[in-house]
Amino acid sequence: MPQLRERASGDAASRRSPYADGFARIFGIETEYGVSVTGADTPCGSAETAAAMFRPVISRSRSSNTYLANGARLYLDVGSHPEYATAEARDPRTAMIQDAAGESLMRRLAMQAQTYLRGIHGPRLLVHLYKNNVDSAGHAFGCHENYLVRRQVSLDMVERQLLPFLITRQLISGAGRVDRGGFQISQRAAFLDEAISSSTTRDRPMVNTRDEPHADPDQFRRLHVIIGDSNRSQFVTRIKLALTHLVLCVIEESQRQGIASGFESCALADPSAANRAISVDMSRSTARLAMEDQAGFARDCQRYAGENRSGHDDGSQSDGPTALGLQYYYHRVVSRFVERYGARIDEDTPGFDAQQTCRVWGTLLDALASGDSAALSRQLDWAAKYRVLRGLLQRESAAHLGARERLDLDYHDIANGVVYDSLLRHGLMREEVDESRVEQALREPPSDTRAVLRGAFIASALAAGIPFSCDWTHLALGAHDGVEHRVEAVLLEPFATSGGADYERLMRACARR
């Protein structure tokens, strides 16, 4: 839902957020799903399938674009893609749980649609709902990460200091994809054209620059990351947010202190070319990244020299680093920063352990460097999928491209897929939270962000049977159904867990019904 640049009014315009300094952050994930049908006796396209999924949503909300009592947004996006945007979370684990709740809700809607469509198109119809980023026709769709960052972090810093991390992060966060050339680490790499842009469809940038902070725009911006893949692995969903959080902490503190972050020389000469080259480099040692300032990067490698546990060439004395070498460099800089600021980061990020996150990061990089596929395939999506594909080829050496592509899609099918569930059952992948915790997240918003206010309002309005409208920062009841005048409230502070006078009036209006 497009939203105008938020502006505070009255006292709020001059009120400085208590979170403007420090390391507190808001996290969110927007996931688009792909839909298809097999086994139908009569034609049934993706548009009809998606519409069937949203029948109960429209019945409740009179719209295919709605907000839920857990604070999340559910809507049908362009191209018949069901989309779920998580409620605001203050830590990576809560954001991951909220994303898992969205997956559970989407699965439920898909199975309800399957029952409905079987009455129209035959009893063998199966609905397939893909949590991935590329369909069988080669069309790409997204998984977008959102991070609240301080306004002093410029878009130039994002492109030059953060983007190289995000591009090389695919070694950990990639979902893997079968293509005619074999296998790629990332689903999205081949489809992203620009480094940063205000578009999300035409130019397909890695980071979107539209200024929609959903917070006070004088103090914050919302970093809208498009480069990431959709992940089935809960571990990957959590760790990609956690690592990005730490890198952002370094960049923000460097701006507050007016000192170097350590990432100034990490800018890539051609981000798009680097992104594509990394994705097809299954050896993780062949693709060398052209740096904008190779000499400066070599100097910084010496400045932040540390124990090279893997013996991997970091690129300081070569034609440029590999993706793994650049990840090791980011790890060294962040680890040094965490030694000094880790306690403050943990204090500002509920349930977070910065030191432990760095240790896990280092362990993953070491496993990538050593080729420890067993360890990687129990945690990383691309490695798990690659292991299954290799098993298929060992059993059927002549397995054709179509069979490999079907296995690829099945891994991401949250409605009727069998591959990922089989990995879970056999202990070859693991989930970090159980079903009861996911169900709780479907009912309840995070308790430490404004999502708790939005969720309480929506639950009250639904219970009272009063039509309502809302978005991320606005809540309203109109002059109808027993509400004499339009009542609305603005929630510009994303960290707020208590509402002001306008919010209290809104809740009283719900209660009077």
Image (cartoon, rainbow, N blue to C red):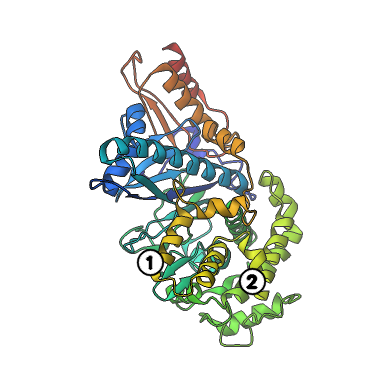
Name the residue type under label 1: Gly
- Whether residue 2 is visible, yes or no, is no
- Compute the Cα span from label 2 to label 1: 29 Å
Residue wearing tag 1: 402
Residue 262 placement (x, y as % from top left):
64, 70
Residue 491 placement (x, y as % from top left):
48, 34
Pick whichever of labels 2 and 1 is earlier in the sequence. Answer: 2
Q: Mark 2: which secondary structure? A: helix
Vertical placement of residue 231 versus 101, above or below: below
- What residue is rendered at 70% in x and 77% in y? 303
Near-viewer residue (2 or 437): 437
For label 1, the crowd category at 10 Å Cα-Cα, with few meaning under 14, some 14 to 19 and many 20 or more, is few
The quadrant holding residue 386 is bottom right
Near-viewer residue (501 or 13): 501
Vertical placement of residue 253 versus 99, above or below: below
Near-viewer residue (2 or 325): 325
**Image quadrant where one finds the C terminus:** top left
Near-viewer residue (94 or 216): 94
Q: Mark 1: which secondary structure? A: helix
Name the residue type under label 2: Leu
Residue wearing tag 2: 368
- Whether residue 402 is visible, yes or no, is yes
Which residue occupies the extreme left position in the image? 42
Vertical placement of residue 427 versus 18, above or below: below
Is 370 on the left or on the right of 234, as rendered?
A: right
